[in-house]
Amino acid sequence: MYVFNEQINKWWWKVRPLRLETRIQSWIKTYSTFYHGLEDSQRKRAERQISKLMLIKEFTLNSKKDYQLEEDMKTIIAHEMFRLASGLDQLYISEL
């Protein structure tokens, strides 16, 4: 199971796409200028990728061991991770 973990997850996410909670989705729609610049299909992809990042990445603070980050902070971090990654994709595509 562990060896095929990534393939199983990809298959499962195709069958049951990840969705953002409504309050997190409303935060992104309200505060993200990057999100407003995307087309509808790109927005759906962004929502799926942000929810996937929030699920698979481990968010910890180095200063306190037992402190858990709130979902809002995870959303901000995952949003910026996606924005940076998509910006790098566009940069490399435009250079080719």
Image (tube, grey):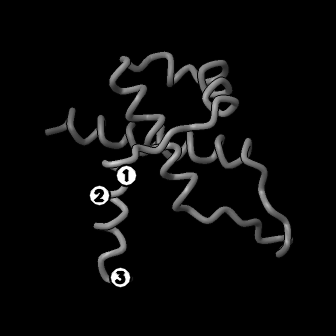
Which image quadrant is residue 57 in?
bottom right
Which residue has dot 2 on it? Answer: 11
Q: Is residue 24 above or below residue 85?
A: above
Residue depicted at 31% across the width and 48% down the height: 14
Element at label 1 = helix
Q: Which amino acid lies under the numbered mark 3 shown in the image of this protein?
A: Met
Q: Is residue 66 above or below residue 32?
A: below
Which residue has dot 3 on it? Answer: 1
42 displayed left or right of 56:
left
35 displayed left or right of 95:
right
Which image quadrant is residue 80 in?
top right
Find out whether the residues at labels 1 and 2 contact each other: C-beta distance under 8 Å.
Answer: yes
Pick the front one: 66 or 7: 7
- Of the numbered discs 3 and 1, the one sitting upstream in the chain is 3
Is the residue marked by circle 1 packed among few (<14), some (14-19), or many (20+) residues within 10 Å? few
Find out whether the residues at labels 2 and 3 contact each other: C-beta distance under 8 Å.
Answer: no
Which residue has dot 1 on it? Answer: 13
Which image quadrant is residue 8 in?
bottom left
Calculate the distance from the C-alpha at mark 3 to the C-alpha at mark 1.
Answer: 16 Å
Q: Position of residue 71 (x, y in %)?
A: 72, 47
Residue depicted at 56% across the width and 19% down the height: 33
